[in-house]
Image (tube, grey):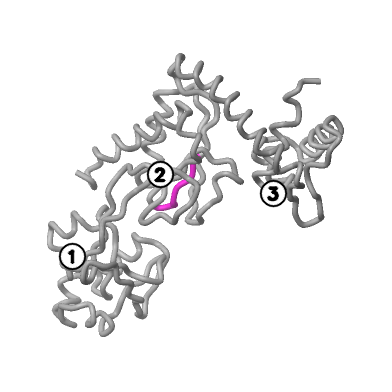
């Protein structure tokens, strides 16, 4: 029996907190993972995990062993990665996720170009507006928009993201133009996925809770409603810049424009060492800079 046998399964269970999620990450059956962990415990003559019908947790021995196993697996994987770097061609499975609308419009076309250059790579993309747990669900890379919550993940900025408050000339002619943040409450606001709009006031970020008679969780739908003169909207630059240049929309309260956020490539700390992840991030950064919406 190999001394490595059961270590990957044990670490996956410890990180995921579940045999079934660990099995999904490793692409194995739950019974296989459970059997390997049980054999490992027999070999060590120590219980590593507490098992109940609802959760799995580490014993005291399991906590100590888990920390050491993580380091061992990281060093083993780094040894394999050093050979991968010498070969310099990304290969194997790369799993990534992005928001639906942004992913369809920007990320998937660029990822497809990357795939065409590296046909030995296997690519899986999940488009969802949910913030997935990358470690538990086994993703190598996520594209996140706006401000990031603090976490154990690492983020690389791959594009700017500036938010604009705007409305159509027809709406402003009929209802007037807001000149201060306090006047926003008197206007009909077109609400998208978020419950608040961000602005800057006296050097600090200010959160405004919009209200109105229209709501949809699609930026393109919000944009269409704004162009029809239904109300004010706050949307990212890539939706509105061309329309602002043409005069189809008017930018409002520019002095209170929120601090620039960004588009981020987010990954577990050690995944950036993988050539396929590092090269894809660079390809996305280069490709986004060349998109007409960002130029």
Mark 1 or 3: in front is: 3
Callout 3 environment at 10 Å: few (<14), some (14 to 19), or many (20+)? some
Residue at disc 3, secondary structure = loop
Regarding residue 250, the answer to whether it shows in the image is no
Q: Give the residue drawn at x 25%, y 79%.
A: 184
Asked if residue 229 lies in the magenta stretch, the reply is no
Please name the residue that numbered disc 2 is placed on: 155
**Which corner quadrant holds the C terminus?**
top left
Q: Nearer the viewer, residue 243 or 27?
A: 27
Q: Earlier in the sequence, mark 2 or mark 3?
A: 3
> Picture quarter containing residue 249?
bottom left
Where is 188 relative to 108, above or below? below
Please name the residue that numbered disc 1 is placed on: 249
Q: Give the residue drawn at x 72%, y 25%.
A: 4
Please name the residue that numbered disc 3 is placed on: 17
**Which corner quadrant holds the N terminus?**
top right
Q: Give the residue drawn at x 61%, y 46%.
A: 136
Callout 1 environment at 10 Å: few (<14), some (14 to 19), or many (20+)? many
Q: CA distance from mark 2 to mark 3?
A: 24 Å
Residue 232 in percent (x, y) is at 26, 73
Q: CA distance from mark 1 to mark 2?
A: 33 Å
> Picture quarter containing residue 162?
bottom left
Residue at disc 1, secondary structure = loop
Where is 112 relative to 176, above or below? above
Regarding residue 33, the answer to whether it shows in the image is yes
Residue 90 in percent (x, y) is at 46, 23
Q: Earlier in the sequence, mark 1 or mark 3?
A: 3
Bounds of the magenta segment: 96-101
């Amino acid at each position: 029996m190999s001394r490595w046998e059961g270590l990957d399964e044990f670490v996956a269970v410890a990180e995921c907190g579940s045999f079934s999620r660990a099995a999904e990450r490793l692409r194995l059956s739950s019974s296989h993972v459970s059997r390997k962990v049980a054999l490992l415990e027999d070999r060590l003559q120590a219980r590593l995990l507490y098992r109940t019908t609802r959760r799995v947790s580490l014993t005291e021995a399991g906590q100590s062993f888990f920390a050491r196993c993580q380091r061992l697996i990281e060093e083993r994987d780094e040894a394999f990665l050093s050979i991968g770097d010498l070969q310099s061609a990304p290969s194997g499975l790369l799993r990534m996720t992005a928001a639906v609308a942004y992913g369809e419009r920007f990320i998937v076309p660029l990822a497809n170009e990357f795939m065409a250059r590296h046909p030995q790579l296997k690519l899986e993309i999940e488009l969802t507006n949910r913030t997935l747990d990358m470690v538990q669900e086994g993703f190598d890379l996520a594209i996140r928009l706006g401000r990031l919550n603090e976490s154990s993940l690492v983020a690389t900025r791959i594009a700017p993201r500036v938010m604009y408050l705007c409305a159509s000339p027809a709406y402003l002619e009929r209802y007037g133009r807001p000149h201060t943040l306090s006047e926003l409450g008197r206007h009909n606001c077109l609400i998208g996925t978020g419950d608040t709009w961000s602005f800057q006031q006296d050097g600090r970020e200010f959160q405004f809770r919009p209200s109105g008679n229209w709501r949809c969780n699609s930026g393109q739908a919000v944009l269409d409603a704004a162009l029809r003169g239904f109300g004010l909207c706050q949307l990212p630059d890539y939706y509105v810049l061309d329309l602002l240049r043409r005069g189809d929309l008017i930018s409002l309260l520019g002095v209170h424009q929120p601090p620039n956020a960004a588009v981020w490539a987010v990954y577990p700390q050690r995944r950036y060492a993988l050539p396929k992840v590092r090269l894809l991030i660079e390809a996305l950064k280069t490709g986004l800079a060349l998109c007409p919406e960002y130029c």
